[in-house]
Amino acid sequence: MEHEEVIDNKGKDVAVSWVSTSRFLFYCQVAIFVALVIGGCYTLYQHRYKGKPNVEVPANTQYNPQYK
């Protein structure tokens, strides 16, 4: 009779357990995606439109120019 040696590598190596590897990679992708979205939102918040600036326009360049 031949006896086959059974080696239990379940959960011990990334290359052996494809299910846990794919789950780990999926969660890494989700975490990276969430980090990029939060970083993009924060960057947009920092560079947001802060309102209409008070720009002094010379009187001779207005729609109805006023000359001296």
Image (cartoon, rainbow, N blue to C red):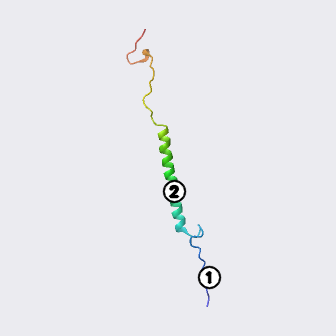
| Marker disc for residue 39 | none
Q: Is residue 39 above or below residue 66?
A: below
Q: Quadrant of residue 17?
A: bottom right
User: Label 1 is placed on what type of residue?
Assistant: Glu
Provide the residue designation for mark 1.
5
> Dot 1: within a 10 Å radius of its alpha carbon, few (fewer than 14), some, or many (20 or more) residues?
few
Question: On the rendered structure, is 52 left or right of 19?
Answer: left
Which residue appears at 60% of the width and 68% of the height? 13
Q: Are marks 1 and 2 in contact (CB under 8 Å)?
A: no
Which residue appears at 55% of the width and 65% of the height? 21
Q: What SS does tag 2 mark?
A: helix
Q: Is residue 41 above or below residue 67?
A: below
Name the quarter where the N terminus is drawn.
bottom right
User: Label 2 is placed on what type of residue?
Assistant: Gln
Q: What SS does tag 1 mark?
A: loop
Mark-to-mark CA distance, 1 and 2: 37 Å
- The percent position of residue 66, horizontal first and vertical second, equals 40, 12
Name the quarter where the C terminus is drawn.
top left
- The percent position of residue 4, horizontal first and vertical second, equals 61, 84
- Residue placed furthest toward the bottom: 1
Q: Nearer the viewer, residue 52 or 65?
A: 52
Q: Earlier in the sequence, mark 1 or mark 2?
A: 1
Q: Is residue 53 above or below residue 18?
A: above
- The percent position of residue 8, horizontal first and vertical second, equals 59, 76
Provide the residue designation for mark 2.
29
Which residue appears at 62% of the width and 82% of the height? 5
- Residue placed furthest toward the top: 68
Q: Is residue 2 above or below residue 57?
A: below
- The percent position of residue 16, horizontal first and vertical second, equals 58, 70
Which residue appears at 47% of the width and 40% of the height? 45
- Residue placed furthest toward the left: 64
> Dot 2: within a 10 Å radius of its alpha carbon, few (fewer than 14), some, or many (20 or more) residues?
few
